[in-house]
Image: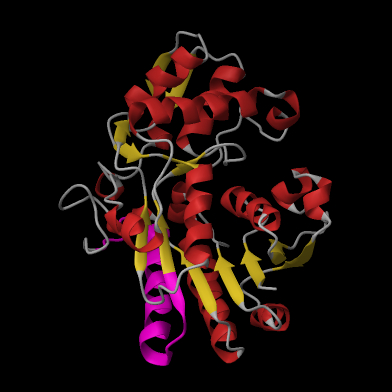
Amino acid sequence: MKKIFLTGADGFIGSHILEKLVRKKYKVKALVYYNSFNNHGWIDKIDNEIKKKVEIISGDVRDAKILRDNIKGCDRIIHLAALIGIPYSYHSPKSYVDTNVQGTLNVLQAAQDLNVKKIIHTSTSEVYGTPKYLPIDENHPINGQSPYAASKIGADQLALSFYQSFGTPVSILRPFNTYGPRQSARAIIPTIILQILSGKKKIKLGNLYSTRDLTFIDDTVEGFLKMIKKNVAGEIVNLGTGYDISIFELVKIISKEMSVKVEIISDKKRIRPKNSEIDKLKANNKKAKKILGWKPKLVNRSGLIKGISKTIHWFSKKDNLNNYKPEIYNI
């Protein structure tokens, strides 16, 4: 039976992938970020029947020994562990290099030395920067407009260098703005939903007119499941819907779905530095369709509304809402 080593398993995307892998009968060893509270992040909230089938390891991708000791015996790796908040990367850029670049190097080195058969490295659409053309395909130039994006470019290039130098069987998935249940409050859709659920009529946001290609979590997870079955080493593959929407329009959809009227306030502390802002992100997903057989189910405006409705429903449940602090803006 194939055994998968999953980093970042305690996070938003990682926990959803973990559930799907177990349901698909994969054996999974899950790396979660160590803390003294023995907290396993979102894994603590998933069904016990799934959780008891997973081997959970507390550690840190910055620790090469922990990775080497625990990757041993696994023939596949899905690497998601990363620092992701763009605003925090302005504050602490070195942390992003340590985790996103050095952490990825540690994963790649262990995978190479232990002859792992397949590695999926997770990228981000942020590496493209402000687009030269739309929709953005995998040949688009990369441009690190934030320390976060720069760290992910570094990690991506390391992955490709291991493939080109050593034949390490690594491929890269590049999701475009995944959203859905369990997402961090710092992301745009949860930010809007949580402010409304807390009773606010004035919603504080940053740039209202940049556009994003929003992909529902189930579709993103399906992309990972497709890639783990394919021999696509050395390839970079976008995961996006090909439909983008402005933040302003997004607020209108969410407020309508929640049956409230809100006023939008532009909050200076939520606005990126001028040259760091990315005006548009819209994916060309033809390659994903061609080499993975992946096609998102929730597409265009109607699909986005369905995904947002599911996300609102999840956040509205008290047990889920209690995991968040909507009154605090967290960079």
Q: Is residue 16 left or right of residue 277?
A: right
Residue 102 drawn at (x, y percent):
52, 75
Is 153 colored magenta in this rendering?
yes
Instruction: Please report the residue visible at 54 percent of the width from the left and 87 percent of the height from the top.
Output: 112
Give residue 83's position: percent from left, percent from top.
53, 58
Question: Which residue occupies the foreground of this view, 48 or 318?
Answer: 48
Q: How is the image coloured?
A: secondary structure
Note whether 168 is above or below 324 in the view shown: below
Instruction: Give the camera-side residue of 312 and 286.
Output: 286
- Image point 71% across, 82% down: which residue? 73
SS assignment for the magenta stretch, majority: helix
Q: Residue at x 49, y 59 (%)?
A: 226
Quarter of the picture containing the N terminus is bottom right
Instruction: Give the image location of residue 77, x and y in percent.
Output: 58, 72
Q: Residue furthest left?
A: 133
Q: Nearer the viewer, residue 139 or 98?
A: 139
State whether residue 252 appears in this view: yes
Q: Quadrant of residue 57?
A: bottom right
Q: In the rendered structure, does residue 85 fall within the stretch colored magenta?
A: no
Magenta region, residue range = 142-171
- Residue 100 on image: x %, y %: 50, 67
Q: Which one is nearer the viewer's eye here, 308 or 192?
A: 308
- Examine the rendered structure and indicate whether residue 36 appears above or below residue 254: below
**Residue 14 position by quadrant:** bottom right
Q: Residue at x 57, y 41 (%)?
A: 183
Q: Is residue 127 visible?
A: no
